[in-house]
Image (spheres, rainbow, N blue to C red):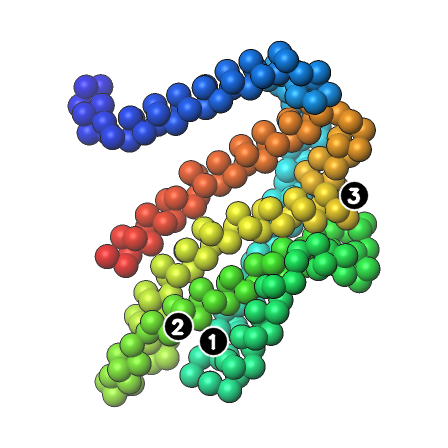
Amino acid sequence: MITFITRHKKELQKAGAGLFGLVALLVLWGLLARNYHPLILPSPLETWRALAALWREGSLAANILITLRRTVYGYSLALLAGFCLALFTKGAGLLGALFRPILLVVQIIPPVVWMVLAVIWFGIANGQASVFLIFIVTLPLAFSSIAAGLESIDGRLVEMARVYRRSRRQIIAEIYLPALYPHLISTVSVGFSFAWKAAIFAEFMGSTSGVGFLLSTANSNLETEKVFAWVLVLVAVMLVCEYGLLIPLRRRAARWSS
């Protein structure tokens, strides 16, 4: 036990500091809630009761999975499209000059405009509007990051591999993938939070299911304690994804590139 503490002293100190910050925030929240009506600021206990009620209703896990599925689906499409566009425009100055301004315009247009168009084009019943918004919001990020990774590849290494008669599969596995891997991990890590936020916004504005829709419903019914409960759910999901998936991926990418 003592050996474990000694080896992980810094990590334990950081975890303790983070836990202390969360407890301090919870205490401050409880103190502030005493001075306001629950309609304005519900207490942590009232929020916990609302969260427990959502769990008993069965709407908690089901709608989290719906939103996660839309997030993963929309962002996967954006990564695939961004990779194809970056690969298609690599080394082609004219095509790059053509696509980059278009993606810049896509990035500049506010998400609310895309959401309005998505509702007009796809409706709100089947979740396609949410997937479309996630895709269109994260596509420029995916393209720019993957394009930067492709540009970082030394062309002389590729030419040398061809001289030594390396196959296309070997060139991809030995040159392209090691160069792209850190960029892909960085794109997934940074872009997933954007995709998650876009999913919540899309469901809030135009959907009949998902966390964003139930958050919108609670807001319309002035159920502030449920609004706070869903906010806690959103934070918890992102923390699980961050510490359970994204941080380990970033560490692996750092080891790969070092």
What residue is rendered at 52% in x and 39% in y?
Answer: 238
Q: Residue beneath label 3, please?
A: 208
Q: Residue beneath label 2, please?
A: 150
Q: Position of residue 9 (x, y in %)?
A: 23, 27
Cβ atoms at labels 2 and 1 below 8 Å apart: yes
Q: Residue beneath label 1, please?
A: 87
Quadrant housing the N terminus: top left
Kind of residue sitting beneath label 1: Leu
Kind of residue sitting beneath label 3: Thr
- Secondary structure beneath dot 2 equals helix
Is any part of residue 123 visible from this angle? yes
Q: Quadrant of residue 237?
A: top right
Is any part of residue 49 visible from this angle? no
Looking at the rendered structure, the number of numbered marks drawn on it comes to 3
The Cα–Cα distance between marks 3 and 1, rounded to whole angstroms, is 37 Å
Q: Nearer the viewer, residue 110 or 177?
A: 110
The Cα–Cα distance between marks 3 and 2, rounded to whole angstroms, is 40 Å
What residue is rendered at 19% in x and 29% in y?
Answer: 7
Mark linked to residue 256: none
What residue is rendered at 64% in x and 26% in y?
Answer: 229
Kind of residue sitting beneath label 2: Leu
Q: Quadrant of residue 117?
A: bottom right
The Cα–Cα distance between marks 2 and 1, rounded to whole angstroms, is 8 Å
First in residue order: circle 3 vs circle 2? 2
Q: Is residue 57 left or right of residue 174?
A: right
